[in-house]
Image: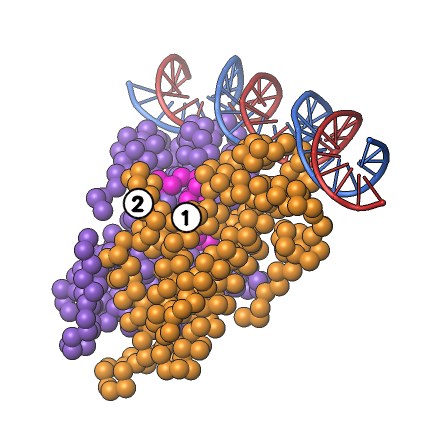
Chain colours: A purple, B orange, C red, D blue
Amino acid sequence: MTAPDFSELERRADPLAPEAPRRTKRGEATQRKLLEAAEAVFAEMGYHEASIVKITERAGIGLGTFYLYFDSKQTIFEALVIDLNRRVRHSMAEAMAGASSRLEAERAGFAGFFRFTAEHPALYRVVREAELVSPEALRLHYTRIVEGYVEGLRKAQAAGEVSDIDPEVAAWALMGIGELVGARYILWERDDDDRRPTELDPHVFAHMMRFIETALAPRPPKGVADEKATP
Amino acid sequence: MTAPDFSELERRADPLAPEAPRRTKRGEATQRKLLEAAEAVFAEMGYHEASIVKITERAGIGLGTFYLYFDSKQTIFEALVIDLNRRVRHSMAEAMAGASSRLEAERAGFAGFFRFTAEHPALYRVVREAELVSPEALRLHYTRIVEGYVEGLRKAQAAGEVSDIDPEVAAWALMGIGELVGARYILWERDDDDRRPTELDPHVFAHMMRFIETALAPRPPKGVADEKATP
DNA sequence: CCAAAACCTGAATCAGGTCTCAGGTTGGAG
DNA sequence: CTCCAACCTGAGACCTGATTCAGGTTTTGG
């Protein structure tokens, strides 16, 4: 339960890391083009079908240039996870900004998450592959998101808005719900039809939120037995 | 929401499909050895690092023999998903067999799921990769499990043991929770320590079940503020 | 304007994979 | 015991794709 250390991963794969080589405007643009191309290519055909050639072609850049910016296919993959993770958290935080209660924030956060999922299927696909391509990057992704949740839940608990459930366990449960519901009701639908839903079906969203809110609701004052577990 | 059709997938990848070629005892044993080796190899190094050579070596079988049983790496991967899916559902059903209430069944089912996850990390890893290696197999896996859940939830609703939430949405939420909690608290722990937990930490399990049970509980008849699902 | 620094390029190298095939082995039915 | 399906084998033909490198181009600072 001690905070994992991702500094090694960030040093080698995060273009925003302090140790990253200085770039001129041009260099930065090229790097961004590569990352964007990688997002598209990895999302479309997955890690092992993707190739550096396809990424550089998509980016409109020479093959050799790739290696000026990333050490390997693995490295750009990790960089992409870090990048997507940053962006999805930003999207969630932005959506939650105006909320006045935890409940409202929860709703907004999920909405932000689903919107991002709809707009960037790569997030879901890439994270799934990360399980085996780069377990370290996978952990960074989930850990960062869970950290945010835990903090929010703790505050809400202090304010009496949420039951005294273990916030970390609850956070993982929430992530799981968001991930699978998003996959099922946004990405699958999209593949089936040609339409591309940009948000979750309101009926599904409503029932999912009801599920979550019920689960987190403070317990009615009467004493329901709390199972104490010896750690 | 119409039931997807997996017959094509099963025809080409399910050794138990009716159209599968007849095998003698020896042939069946070889096929099983290949599937077992594939489980180990895919779980250990993932789809794109795995190779037919590594699988046949692990199985103690000649390279050429592989192609008598599976058309390609993709095919054996799909066969493995189908096989693992069958086994995890069996494990869950078995665990739930003696339960007398839905609540008890829920608990037992999750316990069965986590036990299987602990014993067969391949399930989790392989399913994650299936997202891109074989989306069809991925859908088969999730759909089959959700079908079971939905049926159980419907019955429990009829018996008044579960609220009137949309059972399909709830089923996907439950799957998501199980998957991510299992990944985090069984598989991660295992990788970190050298110890290999064979079941979920009781504290985590208790809080997760509390989360789930609260979420599904029938709404108290008296007026505890009831948020309307339809906004 | 010029030199240095930064950037770009793709043919060639090379490691490692998939799948075929021609021929050997096994086991059980008669 | 014989014979014939059914089964097994692994060398090698054939690909694919990651990575290197020697040399060209563009930008920047003075």
Does the rendering let one see residue B6? yes
> Residue placed at 58% from the left, 68% from the top?
B3
State the residue position of label 1.
B119
> Residue placed at 41% from the left, 66% from the top?
B96
Is residue B63 shown in magenta? no
The magenta span reads A120-137
Does the rendering let one see residue A125? no
- Residue B231 location (% of width, % of height): 35, 78
Q: Secondary structure at mark 2?
A: helix
- Residue A10 location (% of width, % of height): 31, 36
The image quarter containing residue B52 is top right
Vertical position of residue A148 compared to residue A138: above or below: below
> Residue placed at 66% from the left, 52% from the top?
B12
Q: Nearer the viewer, residue A210 or C29?
A: C29
Q: Nearer the viewer, residue B223 or B97?
A: B97
Q: Amino acid at mark 1?
A: Glu
- Residue B44 location (% of width, % of height): 45, 38
Q: Nearer the viewer, residue A85 or B1?
A: B1
Q: Nearer the viewer, residue C6 or A128?
A: A128
State the residue position of label 2.
B189
Vertical position of residue A97 compared to residue A87: above or below: below
Q: Is residue A41 left or right of residue A175?
A: right
The image quarter containing residue A159 is bottom left
